Image (tube, rainbow, N blue to C red):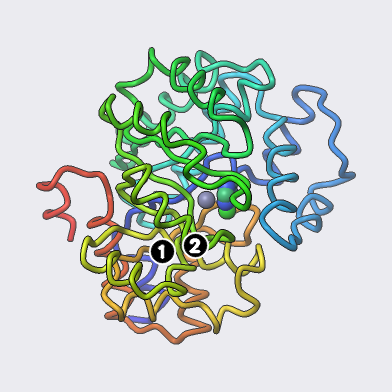
Amino acid sequence: MSLSSIIKNIPKAELHLHIEGSLTPELMWRLAEKHSVSLPYASVEEIEAAYNFKDLQSFLDLYYAGAGVLRDEDDFFILMWEYLTRCAEENIVHTEIMFDPQTHTERGIGFDVFMPGFLRAIQKAETEYGISSYLIMSFLRHLPESEAYQTLEAAKPYYQHIKAVGLDSSELGHPPSKFERVFKKAKSLGFKIVAHAGEEGPASYIWEAIELLDVDRIDHGVRCQEDQALMAYLKEKQIPLTVCPLSNLKLCVIDDMKEHNIVQLLDAGLLVTVNSDDPTYFGGFLNENFEALHTALNIDESTIRALAANSFRASFLPAERKKALI
Ligand code: ES4
Ligand code: ZN
């Protein structure tokens, strides 16, 4: 079997995916027409051509603007359904999906609009594709902690549908310590905890996420190599890193995929996984991330199998289901 067939056919989990970052240019265009939203683009091709980023912030500016076309419950259903349909095509059997409530509540669109849309698509994918999904509610770190508290409060009617709480958006200048209290509260409510750290930010942000937020996983974390004590700790505790190769390339965290350190991290005994982050903005869904690693780093079948096994190990699935999948 070719490496491409192995990548495609092996069952996988995706653990680092922003649902707003799976909005295709075609759907953005359709929804803009539906709601008479004016976009700063003349065509779908122009949207695609705009996806050249110099850093995280230059991406976030377009990503938040793009999410502006999401208005009613059906829009959120279609967004989630299109992503989960893609998962079925890629043999992703379990997914843990981040959503950014504040991107929508700031525009007057509440939990009662996006949550029913998301949940209807998740239920349909469970029934029709056999895909299980958990939701991760992420706080925007460029906003004050008080607004994260308000978001946690507003989510109350949906707590049973939310598995974890996360932290995303502009990393530099917004360290995990800014959110220590709200994450303590989230932990006490029984949520799993994740946080973006060590993407653009330094290794010290990864330490903060561990020591102050008590994270169960780190999103990205690729800068951990700058601190050998941190590497040893991540290995000993097997704290997972959800690594996103095409994202790192598109946001200039690395200059060339050949420089990516994911294999070094795996070889050092860290629990690393492959993920797509914001696939329609970064030029590839999950299998294309595996393909890019194969092309640039020549990863072989055993490495692909190890990374796929790690995706289940690092998931929040119950132990019995993990065992059946690994
Ligand atoms: C994100 Cl790549 C990345 N980093 C931080 N926050 C994000 N939100 C969506 N994608
Ligand atoms: Zn991310």
Residue 219, image x, y percentages = 44, 54
Q: Is residue 2 left or right of residue 289?
A: left
Residue 120, image x, y percentages = 42, 24
Residue 94, image x, y percentages = 31, 47
Q: Quadrant of the image for the N terminus? A: bottom left
Identify the image quadrant of residue 253.
Answer: bottom right
Q: Earlier in the sequence, mark 2 or mark 1?
A: 2
SS at circle 2: loop
Q: What is the C-alpha distance between the residues marked 2 and 1?
A: 6 Å
Which residue is rendered at x = 34% and y = 32% of the image?
184
On the question of residue 279 being in view, the answer is no
Instruction: Establish if 169 lies above or below 247.
Output: above
Residue 270, image x, y percentages = 29, 70
SS at circle 1: strand
Which residue is rendered at x = 24% and y = 62% of the image?
238
Which residue is rendered at x = 17% and y = 52% of the image?
322
- Residues at circles 2 and 1 in contact by the CB criterion of under 8 Å: yes
Residue at the spot of label 1? 274
Q: Quadrant of the image for the C terminus? A: bottom left
Instruction: Establish if 19 lies above or below 307.
Output: above
Q: Amino acid at mark 1?
A: Val
Residue at the spot of label 2? 244
Q: Is residue 127 left or right of residue 290?
A: left
Q: Which mark is residue 294?
A: none
On the question of residue 145 being in view, the answer is yes
Residue placed most toward the observer, 168 or 263: 168
